[in-house]
Image (spheres, rainbow, N blue to C red):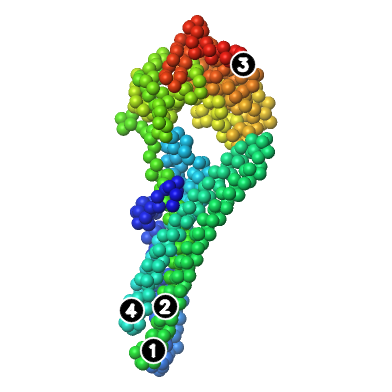
Amino acid sequence: MSEQHGRTRSTRELFVRFIPYFRPYLPILVVDLFCAGMTTLCELVLPVIVRYVTNLAQYHLSELTVSVIARMGILYFVLRVIDTAGTYFMANVGHVMGAKMETDMRRELFAHLQKLSFRYYANAKVGQLMARITSDLFDVTEFAHHCPEEFFIAGVKIAVSFAILLQVNIPLTLITFAVLPVMLACCYKFNRRMRETFKEARWQVGEINAQVEDSLLGIRVVKSFAQEETEQQKFDEGNRRWLEIKKRNYFWMGGFNATTRGFDGLMNLVVLVCGSLFLLNGVIVAGDFVAYLLYVQTLLTSIRRIVEFMEQFQRGMTGIDRFLEIMDEKPDITDAPDAIDCQDVRGEIDFDHVSFSYEDDAGEVLANINLHVKAGENIAIVGPSGGGKTTLSNLIPRFYDVSSGSVRLDGVDVRNIRLHSLRSHIGVVQQDNYLFSGTVLHNIEYGRPGASREEIIEAARLAGADGFISELPNGYDTFIGERGVKLSGGQKQRISIARVFLKDPPVLILDEATSALDNESERLVQQSLDKLAHGRTVFTIAHRLTTIRGADKILVLTSDGIAEQGSHEELIAKGGIYKELYSMYSDLR
């Protein structure tokens, strides 16, 4: 098994981790198992009735009256009514219990995914996560319902059949049941192989999902470069790998089914040959032999049900295993036990001997950064790519934690502030702000859920977005498509700015918010950003240096740290890195 699939947990560990999800539905589970037990007992009574009637007919015919036959018929009818009611409960309420458990697990999984930090998502594929939160958990529903039932029913049938058959004939029973341990040992080996291939298949489905998502979200790039054939080849390769895994899966599944079928026939052969010999020698009577055959068939039917259930069982166990893989991921950005809420935030930011490095990177991205930013000050950060500009700003809302040193907001280490409180006081406008599939109104409202329509429209007006929004087919109720595909880059950016206006945070981070726009869109968006920045502490990361000339302080950030800082005029007069960058930008324009 490849390391990328994670370790395969033992069946015992999976059961121990999964059992707590039954706790809220324990009364339903108890009734469900009671119904399973009743339906099983109803099924096991038939051979007893047949044995009783057969022996009466053969040895005590005078006692086999219409009254006896009627009582046996009524008894069996009542049992079938009980069986029907129990079956309905299991098929209806039992399945609903499984669906509720799936809902609980999906809710818990989604909530956990919300807690995981950027580090996790830097290495995760959305297609893989989608597979785990949908199809994997769907199989858990069937598992949660059928697993207790099937094993309980099988256990009852085997135990009761064994007890009754011992009363019929001890030697024949021991010979027959001696086959079971050998069969179970063989099944165990096949089951382990099946679990491994099921998990590999699930992983590969996630890879296919990720590839399809990547290709479809980038369909404009695919078509503009005429790379449809390349994407098809990538898809075909993933599809082929899935087929190879499924072939191995069905190889082991075929072996499992063939083995159980073979032992099934072996048990029938043992009963037929040994039972006939015992019957020939008068060890057992005809009624007992008929009852014995019926009980063995009941036992074998139960074993066949378990065999048929094993594929579903393995799918369920694999789904639980993959669910736990994510649930066992520990968020590396969490609230401290004594974390506090922000109160009356002014927006004073301090970087005190801050260093930072990514876990998968040998070198430091930031080294010994010291910076004091006054409340309401406008700070611009420039420098070559890879100098740590975005990383520096990401440390303020704790998208990442510092490796050493501290970042403080109004004198309080951000690690001692509750994440929700900290981030609710910081607004971020990025180069590519994500717009959700929905209406313009809902996308702006995301800045402050529950805001009134009037407040949303006012935020759009401040962002310079009200004009073009009003011209849309349905105004603020216009559906903008997935990722805002129906809007231009400038329009999407102004909606994202309106979202931050509505949030009204005291600290603002502008991460190359205009670098992907044309000149006209940049001018309009820059006007909106200037309004948004007024009265707030602002960090502006920019490649277009003309947009930050009015900043109170400009930082030139390189791989060696803050190389220069000062106003635009001071840095130009200094004739250092900033002047060189500004001259290069001016020449390019």
Residue position marked by numbered label 2 in the rendering: 267
Q: Which residue occupies 44% across, 52% down?
A: 1
Disc 1 marks a residue whose amino acid type is Leu
Query: Label 4 crowding class (10 Å Cα cut-off): few <14, some 14-19, many 20+?
Result: few
Distance from disc 3 to disc 4, alpha carbons, whole Å, reads: 92 Å
**Which residue lies under the disc numbered 3?**
588
Q: Which amino acid type is shown beneath numbered disc 4?
A: Leu
Q: Can residue 175 be seen in this view?
A: yes
The three-letter code of the residue at mark 2 reads Met
Q: In which quarter of the image is residue 363?
A: top left
CB contact under 8 Å: marks 3 and 1? no
Q: Quadrant of residue 440 in the image?
A: top right
Coordinates of residue 169 in the picture (x, y in percent): 33, 83
Residue 165: percent from left, percent from top: 35, 80
Sequence-wise, the earlier of marks 3 and 1 is 1
Q: Distance between the residues labelled 3 and 1?
A: 101 Å
The front one of 530 and 117 is 117
- Up-down: is 43 above or below 53? above
* Residues packed near mark 3 inside 10 Å, few (<14), some (14 to 19) or many (20 plus): few
Q: Is tag 3's residue or tag 4's residue first in the polypeptide sequence? A: 4
Of the numbered discs 4 and 1, the one sitting upstream in the chain is: 4
Labelled disc at residue 246 = none
Name the image quarter holding residue 468: top right
- Whole-percent x and y of residue 51? 40, 84
Report the residue marked by disc 1.
Answer: 277
Indicate the secondary structure of the residue bearing disc 1.
helix
| Mark 4 lies on residue | 174
As measured in the structure, the alpha-carbon distance from the residue carrying label 2 to the one carrying label 3 is: 86 Å
Do the residues under discs 3 and 4 have CB atoms within 8 angstroms? no
Please give left or right for residue 92 compared with residue 457 in the image: left
